[in-house]
Image (cartoon, rainbow, N blue to C red):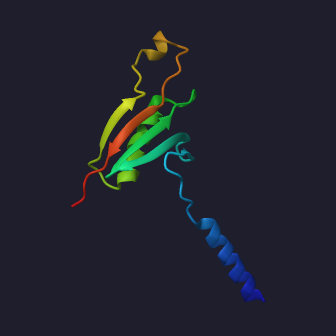
Amino acid sequence: MKNSIYLLLALALTGCANNVETPNGASQWDFDHQVQFKQTDLKDGKHHLQVIAKQSTEFSKLATFLMRQSLRICKSYGFKIEVLEGVERFDDKLSFPNMIMPSLSANIECPISQ
């Protein structure tokens, strides 16, 4: 009886530990960095990453997450980042204090492993 309880507990914990596959392009949340993002696999080692801007999230945090997530996606250095939109100028908040900043959006190309 005691062994069957341990077996059921072990199976339940194993079921909780399985990684759930996130649909391509679905909105995700990174709890470590407190950042919301969307990641889309395009083709042949190319990915699209959109880090969603929030009022309270600084640009430096978005850019740092973009770099770290690119490394996580490619699993090595040598990746290329093509920034599509979302880079703010140093005077944007002074010139346009109520401006809604766009999300940081980029295409990532992983190096071809040989």
Q: Which residue lies furthest to the right in this view?
A: 1
In this picture, residue 88 sits left or right of residue 32? left
Q: Where is residue 67 in the image (x, y as percent from the top left)?
A: 38, 42
The N terminus, quarter of image: bottom right
Q: Where is residue 96 in the image (x, y as percent from the top left)?
A: 49, 12
Give residue 17's quadrant in the image. bottom right
Identify the residue at image location x=46%, y=38%: 50
Q: Which residue lies furthest to the front in this view?
A: 43
The answer to whether residue 24 is above or below residue 94 is: below
Q: Residue furthest top?
A: 95
Identify the residue at image location x=43%, y=27%: 86
Q: Position of residue 95 (x, y in %)?
A: 46, 10
The C terminus, quarter of image: bottom left
Q: Where is residue 13 in the image (x, y as percent from the top left)?
A: 65, 71
Q: Total marks drawn?
A: 0
Identify the residue at image location x=39%, y=52%: 73
In this picture, residue 12 sits left or right of residue 41? right
The answer to which of 46 and 5 lies nearer the viewer is 46
In this picture, residue 77 sits left or right of residue 51? left
